[in-house]
Amino acid sequence: MTTYKFPHNFLWGAATAAYQIEGAWNEDGKGESIWDRFSHTPGKISDQSTGDIACDHYHRYEEDIDLMRRLGLKAYRFSIAWTRILPAGRGRINPKGLDFYDRLIDSLCAANIEPFLTLYHWDLPQALQDEGGWENRNTCHAFADYSALAVKHFGDRVKYWTTFNEPSVVAFDGNLSGEHAPGNQDPRITYQVAHNLMVAHGLGVQAIRSANSKVEAGIVLNLWMADPATDKPEDIAEANAAWDRSETLFLDPIFKGHYPLAAYDLVGENMPKIYDGDLALISQELDYVGINFYSRNLVSASGNIDKVHGSEYTEMGWEVCAPAMRRMLVKINNEYRLPPIYITENGSAFKDEVGADGKVHDPRRLDYLKQHFIQTRLAMQDGVDVRGYMVWSLMDNFEWGHGFTKRFGLIRMDYETQKRTFKDSGDWYAEVIRKNEVSGT
Ligand code: IFM
């Protein structure tokens, strides 16, 4: 058994997103978002649920901050619902929306918990979708104006500002597979959205910095390591090609200032409109990058791979493979000139039950987190500059197209009663934070 100490000031946290926990979907002047519209459309969510109430965090945020205190969180990553403060995406400001986030942020600060704020975690105002959404470049300007408003208002208390959470999921799940809002299935729209999200990120960073020069601006990318299924040269080549086709689509424009040829060769007639100056805008220096890591893709030259014999899989069907996290971190650190890294999401969904003793014993989640903390610490020893770690998620919540069927929380939610119950992983995480170390093999 080895004990892995983390650096002093390491920012241990937990993460959530507005639509997944807040509820109060149409209260106090909030406008409709694309996720309100999508979840209210029959057949879109596997258990027919919606985020109308979710964890009712809008009304119970104080209780939730008490739970964060019990965890000893140093940081809390959450997102703003754009439609709470600008119900139509631009124009009229909703003071009650600002008021909610003021109260939330003030309570976090009073609890000594650093607010780590995401501006866009997928809930575009429906009014902007009605004008074409992210396919329409005007949405990028609306995003910059919304960013400036938020930073002017909250920037005195919030230091960390993330423009986008997982732009690849926004582009591909929302516009190619159609499994997410707004539910398009169109490759032409997908690539235009992918590019426009990058433009909006660049405009957002400019807006954040001109609204408050003291805050930090970054973006959050989700990365899956691509591992070869065997050590045959053709599988290794295919794994490298798979990484180049997908993960570089957002890393390259942001950190190299150009799109990856490997990815854009494949786009053909769906090539987005890119204007002069876009790439300079997109590749502005960032203060940090957030990385979300859950699993890896196993790649073989001969095609698809079935489940890996002997590997454990989560309820999402994702393989548990913590060493892939270290390899991914080392790879991006070698291939890009990166700012400091925060692990902004990592976690696992398992079928948790409340035991006869009234407790939630979730040894698989605890072990998943332990292994990933250790691999991250090892990557830090390899020279990767990781400054913090936000577990996904603080509590079970609305898992998008899966509704409430997947539980990622450190805290269990009973959605009928809104009762919150600490899981064993939550108690264990509190100890990790308190000791600033993790022990394991
Ligand atoms: O729940 C999501 C989150 O909103 C974005 N990253 C992945 C999580 C688990 O699927």
Image: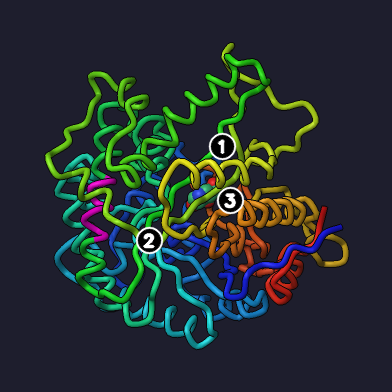
User: Rounded to the nearest whole Å, what is the CA distance between mark 3 and mark 1?
Assistant: 27 Å
- 2 or 1: mark nearer the eye: 1
Instruction: Please name the residue that numbered disc 1 is placed on.
Output: 225
Ligand 1 closer than 8 Å to label 3 CB: no
The tag on residue 162 is 2
The kind of residue on which mark 3 rests is Phe
Task: Looking at this view, name the residue that lies furthest to the bottom.
Answer: 110
* Relative to 195, 231 lies left or right: right
Dividing the picture into quarters, in which one does residue 246 lie?
top left
Instruction: Please name the residue that numbered disc 3 is placed on.
Output: 404
Instruction: For residue 25, say whether it is visible.
Output: no
How far from the left and from the top, in percent, is residue 146?
A: 23, 64
Crowding at mark 1 (Cα within 10 Å: few <14, some 14-19, many 20+): many
Provide the residue span drawn in magenta: 197-205
Q: Mark 2 or mark 3, which is nearer the start of the sequence?
A: 2
For this rendering, which residue is in front, 46 or 361? 361
> Does residue 75 sit above or below 378 in this rendering?
below
For this rendering, which residue is in front, 317 or 377? 377
Identity of the residue drawn at 71% across and 76% down: 434
Identity of the residue drawn at 23% across and 47% down: 199
For this rendering, which residue is in front, 373 or 80? 373
